[in-house]
Image (cartoon, grey):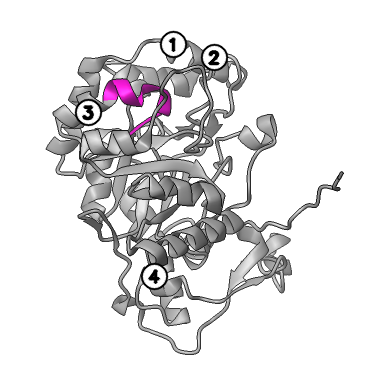
Amino acid sequence: MAQMKELKRAYGFDDVAIAPGEITLNPEGVDTSFKFDGHEFKIPFLASAMDAVVNPSFAGELSRLGGLAVLNLDGLQTRYEDTESIYSDIASTPREEATAFLQKIYSQPVRDDLVSRRVEEIKASGATCAVSLTPANTKRLAPLLKEAGAEILVVQSTVTTVRHISKSLRGLVFSDLIESLGLPVLVGNTVSPEVTRQLMEEGVSGILVGVGPGAACTSREVLGIGVPQVTATIQTAYARDQYFEDTGRYVPIITDGGIRTGGDVCKSIAAGADAVMIGTPFAQAKEAPGLGFNWGMATPHASLPRGTRIQVGTKASLEQILLGPSSLTDGTQNLVGALEISMGMVGAATVREMHQAEMIIAPSIKTEGKIFQHAGLGS
């Protein structure tokens, strides 16, 4: 019997708000720590495995500030021994030629010796070594990164599922990978409770949530695929909570992409995220290798690029972006301070308590009463 397709309403950051709580806390009294599988981080911030964001020295600096950076082992850092000139060339390429140039430089093969070297450089910086691979390269490179001393593996693609049909006799099986590596494995990206549950049952240590929201990603335009981040986070967090009730094992949800401001961070956590993964705001840091530019991981795709190089500028140090102080009123700096104050306003002493904050649908929340701001009439 034929059925008419029905559309569900889904919500992004600008569609919702967090309602104040019945009690309040001093911001300095809240705990923003993020934990999984024996690792603990002072702040719930991960840096995206994007070439313009993370290199070994950036990983060291974010670690010093309490977060975790993920290095892209499929990217420039493992294709070129000296990357500084490559980054300079990318930054100086005219906008209309940027994607073709990225396709060209990413055609160089990944070098096994550089995989090991980058892992060793991150460890030498004092940071927890987290690295990212695409599913296609995971089986080949995973033993190398483990031998070199990597501590966390992120397996990431635009859309990740447990049930993937391909011509391979035996594709990537997460349970086998986790058993053979003996390392925590974070997997993404997904947006649905069903896939989230299936991935958790494979033994993964964390789920990355978000399809196409990143500032440098064009998957939503090119492929038409994606779910707004607040709805995606709520859905996957529900699967996490059900899985925890059934098994006693807690698997964190990490909202990945589309986060621009402290308000977006707070809404991600209130929607159920245990941490956030950030790309473009960190690409604006003085310590980022991209020289004021950012581009998506799929931008260099040989036949169908799903990203673009964007100029984001160099705005502040990583410490100022995360911890302030900030003289800006647009919410793009002191992201940790914003989270602490928001948690205090809803009476949440921990991130998991923040999950219980009331959220409301409020599409006018950023414009109500703000005529002078939006008309450019502020002082």
Disc 2 marks which residue?
302
Quarter of the picture holding the C terminus: bottom right
Q: The disc labelled 3 sits on which kind of residue?
A: Leu
Disc 1 marks which residue?
107
User: Mark 2, mark 3: which one is toward the viewer?
Assistant: 3
Q: CA distance from mark 2 to mark 3?
A: 26 Å
Q: The disc labelled 2 sits on which kind of residue?
A: Ala
Above or below residue 370? Residue 71 is above
- Residue at x 51%, y 17% (from the top left corner): 167
Q: CA distance from mark 3 to mark 1?
A: 22 Å
Q: The disc labelled 1 sits on which kind of residue?
A: Ser
Label number found at residue 145: 3
Disc 4 marks which residue?
352
Quadrant for residue 326, please give it. Answer: bottom left
Q: CA distance from mark 3 to mark 4?
A: 32 Å
Magenta residues: mostly which secondary structure? helix
- Graded by Cα atoms within 10 Å as few (under 14), some (14 to 19) or many (20 or more), the crowding at tag 4 reads some
User: Mark 2, mark 4: which one is toward the viewer?
Assistant: 4
Quadrant for residue 220, please give it. Answer: top right
Start and end of the magenta stretch? Answer: 132-141
Residue 262 appears in view: no
Residue 314 appears in view: yes
Mark positioned earlier in the residue sequence (3 or 4) = 3
Mark positioned earlier in the residue sequence (2 or 1) = 1
Do tag 2 and tag 1 residues touch (Cβ < 8 Å)? yes
Quarter of the picture holding the N terminus: top right
Mark positioned earlier in the residue sequence (1 or 4) = 1
Do tag 2 and tag 3 residues touch (Cβ < 8 Å)? no
Q: Where does residue 38 sit, x and y in percent of width and height?
A: 20, 55
Judging from the image, what secondary structure is the residue with disc 1 in?
Answer: loop
* Residue, far bottom: 22
Mark positioned earlier in the residue sequence (3 or 1) = 1
